[in-house]
Image (cartoon, grey):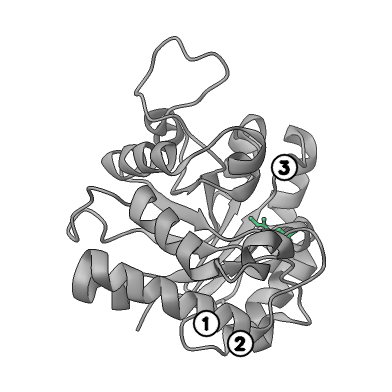
């Protein structure tokens, strides 16, 4: 059985004190056994330490939203995988569509960052997904294939054993327009096939999570699909009760 993951991307919300409050609320909410096998949140880098401290003693872990592939150096404004690891990160989001769209992230930088995450024992959550224009032009599968082949280039099955893929259709992010379970399942099945081409049998054990307007009321339909192994939640992860309710739908 594949691990089922509930991941909360806080994006550029919650400074250190608000993030601490949300971390404490999550610790309180998720104190018993949870349906997902793992639950993690991705606060802004400046708030990471306060969230990590707030979650101490809780099964919840934390990750970073981005990293740089170099260990250190003159890269103003960046943080390295080694720094994220030292600060207690377990996961790293790589190549989120907002980073591709607004910050020049490419399949090539995704590839470097994924390798850096793996080299530092972080679990990379590699994000892929098509724009509305690409979906309307029947290019969804082609785009996903390109992003996976480029982003995961040069990785052996052995080195890729811990990766997570997040399918996040750009048109469903922050729009309230969620992919139907059938649309999402079709994309996830395609992603799994591509992972099989890249990594053989390992593909069957790699979690593929869905992101894009996941809410408590639409999570169950998505999570019941055979190739959907969890959720990467944006807006709804900023509320402890809502985030917990999504996990209950697993
Ligand atoms: P929303 O859940 O706000 O649509 O965001 C999804 C997302 O981008 C998570 O990374």
Residue 230 coordinates in the image, percent (x, y) = 54, 73
Residue 188 position (above or below residue 161): below
Q: Nearer the viewer, residue 62 or 139?
A: 139
Give residue 216's quadrant in the image. Answer: bottom right
Q: CA distance from mark 3 to mark 2?
A: 37 Å
Say if mark 2 contacts mark 1, CB within 8 Å: yes
Q: Looking at the image, is mark 1 or mark 3 earlier in the sequence? A: 3
Residue 96 position (above or below residue 30): above
Residue name at image x 23 percent, y 51 percent: 155
**Location of ligand 1 given as a quarter of the image:** bottom right
Pointer 3: what residue? 20
Depth check, mark 1 against mark 3: the one in front is: 1
Q: The N terminus appears in which quarter of the rendering?
A: bottom left
Q: CA distance from mark 1 to mark 3?
A: 38 Å
Residue name at image x 49 percent, y 26 percent: 79
Residue name at image x 48 percent, y 34 percent: 67
Give residue 250's quadrant in the image. Answer: bottom right
Pointer 1: what residue? 186
Look at the numbered disc 2 and give the secondary structure of its residue. helix
Label of residue 197 in the image? none
Residue name at image x 25 percent, y 64 percent: 198
Depth check, mark 3 against mark 2: the one in front is: 2
Label of residue 182 in the image? 2
Residue 37 coordinates in the image, percent (x, y) = 47, 73
């Amino acid at each position: 059985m594949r691990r089922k993951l509930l991941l909360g991307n806080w994006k550029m919300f919650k400074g250190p004190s608000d993030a601490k409050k949300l971390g404490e609320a999550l610790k309180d909410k998720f104190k018993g056994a949870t349906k997902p096998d793992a639950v993690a949140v991705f606060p802004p880098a400046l708030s990471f330490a306060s969230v990590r401290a707030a979650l101490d003693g809780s099964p919840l872990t934390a990750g970073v939203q981005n990293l740089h592939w170099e260990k250190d150096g003159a890269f103003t404004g960046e943080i390295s995988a080694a720094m994220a690891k030292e600060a207690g990160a377990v996961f790293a989001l790589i190549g989120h569509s907002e980073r591709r769209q607004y910050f020049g992230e490419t399949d090539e930088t995704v590839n470097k960052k994924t390798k850096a995450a793996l080299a530092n024992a972080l679990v990379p959550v590699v994000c892929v997904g098509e724009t509305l224009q690409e979906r309307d032009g029947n290019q969804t599968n082609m785009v996903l294939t390109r992003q996976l082949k480029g982003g995961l280039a040069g990785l052996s099955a052995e080195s890729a054993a811990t990766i997570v893929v997040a399918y996040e259709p750009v048109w469903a992010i922050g729009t309230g327009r969620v992919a139907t379970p059938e649309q999402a399942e079709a994309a996830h099945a395609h992603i799994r096939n591509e992972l099989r081409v890249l990594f053989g049998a390992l593909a069957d054990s790699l979690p593929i999570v869905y992101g894009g307007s996941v809410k408590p009321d639409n999570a169950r339909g998505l999570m019941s699909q055979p190739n959907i192994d969890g959720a990467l939640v944006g807006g709804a992860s900023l509320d402890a009760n809502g985030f917990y309710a999504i996990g209950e739908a697993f």
